[in-house]
Amino acid sequence: MNRRSFLRQGAAGAAFALLSRSAFASALDAQQTPAPLTKVVRTEEEWKRLLTPEQYAVARQKGTEAPYSSPLNKLYAKGTYTCVCCDLPLFSSSAKFDSQTGWPSFWKPINAQHVREETDTSLAEETRTEVLCARCDAHLGHVFKDGPRPTGLRYCINGVALKFTKKSKAA
């Protein structure tokens, strides 16, 4: 092999490596970019058939359950809290804490794209940040800036708007 062939093959190999690395990085980025959520849309009659009256009042009509009424408030088993309306995973038990407010509280959602926030001016004396399911728009509760580290947030969530799935021992 002469010098010219050696240099040509070396340059071709380097170009291939750069292109491969770029393609690999693009593939990784595509894997890490979550797919957009498919919206769940139902009529009010369908929601009423699927949910209990209390679930409907809270999740679809922006109600609030009575404090300390949810069995999920003091539940600390390992698992996942999902939306009662569409089963979207919302919160992990690893982010749950006892806020002593009477509602299940979390310092972060499982995925920030699974919840959305809106300004809530329904109380004359306070503007709050409402938390909704990003897939079906169910009212979940509110988020406040008085939570624990590392986020400093307290997602104060109505237990009736959640379903809990215990983590299996095999997982």
Image (spheres, helix red, strand yellow):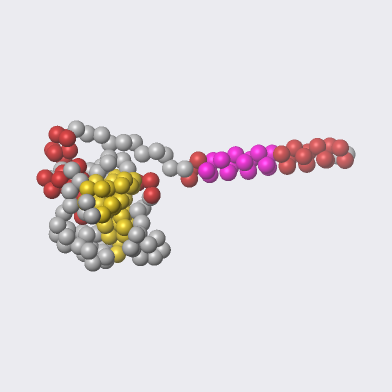
Magenta stretch, overall SS: helix
Whether residue 20 is in magenta: the answer is yes
Q: Which residue is rendered at x = 77% and y = 39% of the image?
A: 11
Q: Quadrant of the C terminus?
A: bottom left
Q: Is residue 13 above or below residue 68?
A: above
Q: Nearer the viewer, residue 95 or 116?
A: 116
Q: Is residue 18 above or below residue 97?
A: above
Residue 20 lies in quadrant: top right
Residue for point 38% across, 46% down: 113
Q: Is residue 138 magenta?
A: no
The residue at 24%/44% (across/down) is: 138
Say whether residue 110 is visible: yes
Is 64 left, or right, of 36 in this rendering?
Answer: left
The single residue placed furthest to the left in the displayed view is 53
Residue at screen point 22% across, 43% down: 85
Span shown in magenta: 16-29
